[in-house]
Image (spheres, rainbow, N blue to C red):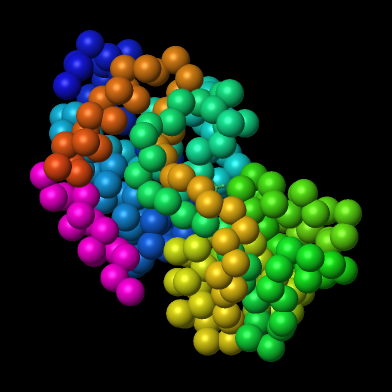
Amino acid sequence: LLKTALYAQEKLYVGTDATEFPPFEYIENGEIKGFDIDLIKEIGKLLDKEIIIKNIQFDGLIPALQTGKLDIVIAGMTVTTEREKNINFSKPYYTSKQLLIMDKKTNLDTLQSLNGHKVGVVLGCTGDIIATEIQDFITIYRYNTTSESIMALNANKIHAVILDSEPAKNFVKNNPNLKYIDNELAREDYAIAVGKENLSLVKDINSALETLKSNGVFENLNKKYFVE
Ligand code: GLN
């Protein structure tokens, strides 16, 4: 691996939004855990860097990369052309989709069926892009965190939330009153993000990802977090 990096320091400051996006990141007994956290720690080992995790609200993650407060973001973050204007993404490490999640008694399935309804999204997330496309016929409620959107749903303040598939399945598992509709509103790739100028870091992250895929570590992480 290249060690001629712009990131000459021994520590890598890694931002995520841990409240809460299971199984990618979540807080358990006061500790930030999840697939993304394990993955970035494995990458840290290969790059010989100490990983320091910072919990930051999702819409603050990209600005923190841009101002150099963070070296890396790993937060189930979807690669979008808009984001690529401001930051660099590694090779994708997970394919996800956007789903609808709602109360079991609610019958909404397509985007069209949301007509006249209140729809929750997390501020700055890709669910917000989908909601914004249909803003003429829905009312959008934007929340700071995923858990706040789920709380609003449970309190019947909104009719549905547009959310990433794996967290959606996790929330449904833990809230028996909820269901998800697997209508694949969008297919997305998650990748690790670094600052625009930090090309050597993104290169090193990509080679570390390749190593973890060939030595079985990546597969074991998948087994640990995505058992159906
Ligand atoms: N994948 C979505 C996005 O990138 C949501 C990520 C999240 O809430 N942590 O916008």
Image location (x, y in percent) of residue 149: 64, 65
The answer to whether residue 26 is left or right of residue 175 is left
Q: Nearer the viewer, residue 172 or 81?
A: 81
User: Which quarter shows the C terminus?
Assistant: bottom left
State which region is magenta.
215-228
Q: Which residue is found at the position 68% from the left and 73% from the top?
A: 109
Q: Which residue is found at the position 23% from the left and 29% from the top?
A: 207
- Could you say which quadrant of the image residue 98 lies in? bottom right
178 inside magenta stretch: no
Q: Main secondary structure of the magenta part?
A: helix
User: Which quarter shows the N terminus?
Assistant: top left
218 inside magenta stretch: yes
Q: Nearer the viewer, residue 227 or 27?
A: 227
Q: Which residue is found at the position 28% from the left and 30% from the top?
A: 206
Q: Which residue is found at the position 57% from the left and 80% from the top?
A: 179
Residue 79 in view here: yes
